[in-house]
Image (cartoon, helix red, strand yellow):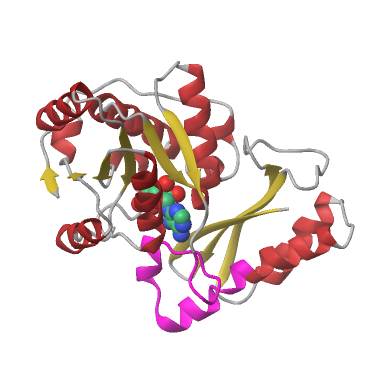
């Protein structure tokens, strides 16, 4: 497996692969890889001849008081895992490689990004769509593989690809969880064991919401109230609980059973966690 840091070298590698008739799949990540990320690498491996995993802690998607500086960085361990999962390339540029000092161009989706996480993280998705466009332009993948853990993010990427006629197929991959139900996240590292155990209530609250729907309830306010009630404890601050369209992540006024998703974001102690479930 190769580690490439230079965008120019990455472009050359991709151009050569395409000239040889190979299909390329890109898995964009911020590193500190866990089994959730690695499931995307496996998915990419099943789709394409060449698997590129980008590892880039993207400054433009972090707000001023967010965790950019303390975000875990562990390239050696990540490289080991990517090798074990048969990736071909890690593309790990520095911020200076990606953003010119006077970079002034952004890609901005303005509908889906207004809801859910967009309300509390105003420039977050602008940073995501911008960096994903840059990565697509450098790697020129046939496939981009994204996790449903970040359901709103993948909806926004799909919208961007459609709206801008980008030549890449977006592939969704399901959420990978710990045995106790907690969705794997690089940010789980911030939590103590006790917080970790407590955060499993996030998944349980979503399952309670789903059980209510499975029992015949279609009242969105009741579903939301149950989830909020169930997740709340002394350590949890709910950022939002919402019911959205499962594909577009846009708000719904009526429940379309099977095609909706409960999305949740909470502060659990000092850690911001998100999760979702199809209902
Ligand atoms: P991140 O490094 O957090 O930016 O995530 C990179 C990619 O991995 C995104 O497409 C995420 O949705 C995906 N991902 C993160 N955690 C999980 C998980 N637990 N299960 C599946 N995909 C995940």
User: Position of 63 compared to 170: left or right?
Assistant: left
Which residue extends farthest bottom? 194
Kindly identify the residue that appears in the image at 87 percent across and 63 percent down. Answer: 215
Kindly identify the residue that appears in the image at 69 percent across and 43 percent down. Answer: 244
Q: Is residue 55 above or below residue 232?
A: above
For the image, the number of numbered tags is 0
Q: Is residue 62 above or below residue 155?
A: below
Image position, residue 259 (x, y; %): 73, 43
| Residue 88 on the magenta span | no
Q: Is residue 262 above or below residue 152?
A: below
Image position, residue 41 (x, y; %): 34, 50
Kindly identify the residue that appears in the image at 27 percent across and 24 percent down. Answer: 137
Which residue extends farthest front? 21
The answer to which quarter of the image holds residue 111 is: top right
Closer-to-camera residue (146/41)? 41
Which residue extends farthest right? 216
User: Position of 28 compared to 174: left or right?
Assistant: left
| Residue 187 on the magenta span | yes
Kindly identify the residue that appears in the image at 40 percent across and 26 percent down. Answer: 168
User: Position of 250 compared to 221: left or right?
Assistant: left
Closer-to-camera residue (278/61)? 278
The answer to which quarter of the image holds residue 126 is: top left
Does residue 53 appear in the picture of this structure? yes
Closer-to-camera residue (175/196)? 175
Range drawn in magenta: 177-203
Does residue 109 appear in the picture of this structure? no
Image position, residue 240 (x, y; %): 63, 53
């Amino acid at each position: 497996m190769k580690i490439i840091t230079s965008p120019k070298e990455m472009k050359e590698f991709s151009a050569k692969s395409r000239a040889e008739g190979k299909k390329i799949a890109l898995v964009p990540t911020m590193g500190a890889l866990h089994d959730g990320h690695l499931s995307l690498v496996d998915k990419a491996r099943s789709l394409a001849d060449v698997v590129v995993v980008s590892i880039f802690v993207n400054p433009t998607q972090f707000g001023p008081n967010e965790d950019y500086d303390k975000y875990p960085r562990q390239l050696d361990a990540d490289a080991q895992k990517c090798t074990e999962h048969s990736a071909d390339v890690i593309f790990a540029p520095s911020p200076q490689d990606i953003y010119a000092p006077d970079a002034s161009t952004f890609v901005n989706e303005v509908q889906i990004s207004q809801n859910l996480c967009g309300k509390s993280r105003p420039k977050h998705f602008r940073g995501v769509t911008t960096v994903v466009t840059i990565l697509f332009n450098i790697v020129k993948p046939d496939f981009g593989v994204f996790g449903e853990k970040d359901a709103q993010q993948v909806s926004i990427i799909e919208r961007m690809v459609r709206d801008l006629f980008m030549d890449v197929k977006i592939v969704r991959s399901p959420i990978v969880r710990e045995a106790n139900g907690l969705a794997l996240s690089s940010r789980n590292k911030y939590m103590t064991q006790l917080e970790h155990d407590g955060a499993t209530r996030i998944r349980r609250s979503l399952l309670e919401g789903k059980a209510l729907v499975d029992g015949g309830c279609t009242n969105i306010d009741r579903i939301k109230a149950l989830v909020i009630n169930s997740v709340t404890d002394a350590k949890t601050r709910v950022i939002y609980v919402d019911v959205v369209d499962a594909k577009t992540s846009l708000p719904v006024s009526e429940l379309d059973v099977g095609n909706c998703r409960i999305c949740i974001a909470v502060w659990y102690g000092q850690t911001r966690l998100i999760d979702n479930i199809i209902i």
